[in-house]
Amino acid sequence: MGNRIYFTSFAAMQKTSCEIVLMPLPIGEKSWEQMDTAYFRHELSTITCWVAENARTLRRFISSLQMGINIPNLDILELTRDTKQPDIEAFLNANLNQRKIGVCSEAGMPCIADPGNRIVEWAHKRNLTVSPLVGPSSLFLTLAASGLNGQSFTFHGYAPLKDDELKSWSKTLIPNEKRTPAHIFIETPYRTDRLVQWFIKNIPQDYKLCIGYDLHGENQTIVTKTITDWRNSVPEIGKVPCVFIIGK
């Protein structure tokens, strides 16, 4: 008789004792209009243990919904890039008896331009179920509305600060290809206008620059122009959170 091969489904591989739920938060005034569903509210009401980038933001959001959730009883670990891994694991291990642990971000969708991936990595090592809920991401909202390459793209995080570093970095964004990938990046709001002016002066004129700002806010704007067109009308954005995309 030949050897039998047994296949195990992914569902069977995962334990259900504790589920990690990735809960997006609004990124602007209009986010909640699209996010407010019975399913979202139900999931939110079942979670008392949280990992949040900012505990105050989470508490204020839940309180604003007036769902009768006991805010002082919520157990919240604040997660930043400086949070030490032993502290993270100590908190998570102490709460493995919870049915669900929520993870939320200051940037809308958890784990996208956000340190929440450290929680998810920990969960996968223990075969825990990870459930992402639908929510806004300023990066992907801007990319979708940019008209640039949505099939090949890279998120670079923050652009370099110094001019010489910025010059070297920008050269890597301009390969000799007919269809270039989209390059997504962000900047600290008070340096936004400086960065826009630098790119308009230094990026080849046939390239395109998309600027998306105040995503899901009252003044949401997403505009893609060639560098030549931007040079004819250099925008002044001010201290508004932005997403930038360079492509062709």
Image (cartoon, helix red, strand yellow):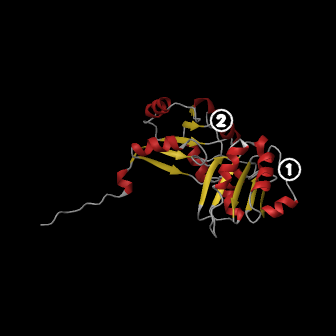
Amino acid beneath label 1: Glu
Q: Dot 1: within a 10 Å radius of its alpha carbon, few (fewer than 14), some, or many (20 or more) residues?
A: few
Q: Nearer the viewer, residue 79 or 238?
A: 238
Front residue of 38/116: it is: 116
Residue underneath mark 2: 59
Relative side of 244 to 109, left or right: right
Pick the quarter of the image with the C terminus: bottom right
Q: Residue at x 74, y 61 (%)?
A: 204
Q: Which mark is residue 236?
A: 1
Residue at image coords 35%, 52%:
13
Residue at 59%, 63% in the rendered image:
152
87 up-or-down from 182: above or below: above
Marks 2 and 1 sit apart, C-alpha to C-alpha, by 34 Å
SS of the residue under disc 1:
loop
Assess disc 2: are there few (<14), some (14-19) or many (≥20) residues with their C-alpha within 10 Å of its C-alpha: some
**Does the image show residue 220?**
no
Q: Which of the two labelled residues, at mark 2 and mark 1, occupies the earlier sequence position?
A: 2
Tell me the kind of residue under disc 2.
Arg
Q: Nearer the viewer, mark 2 or mark 1?
A: 1
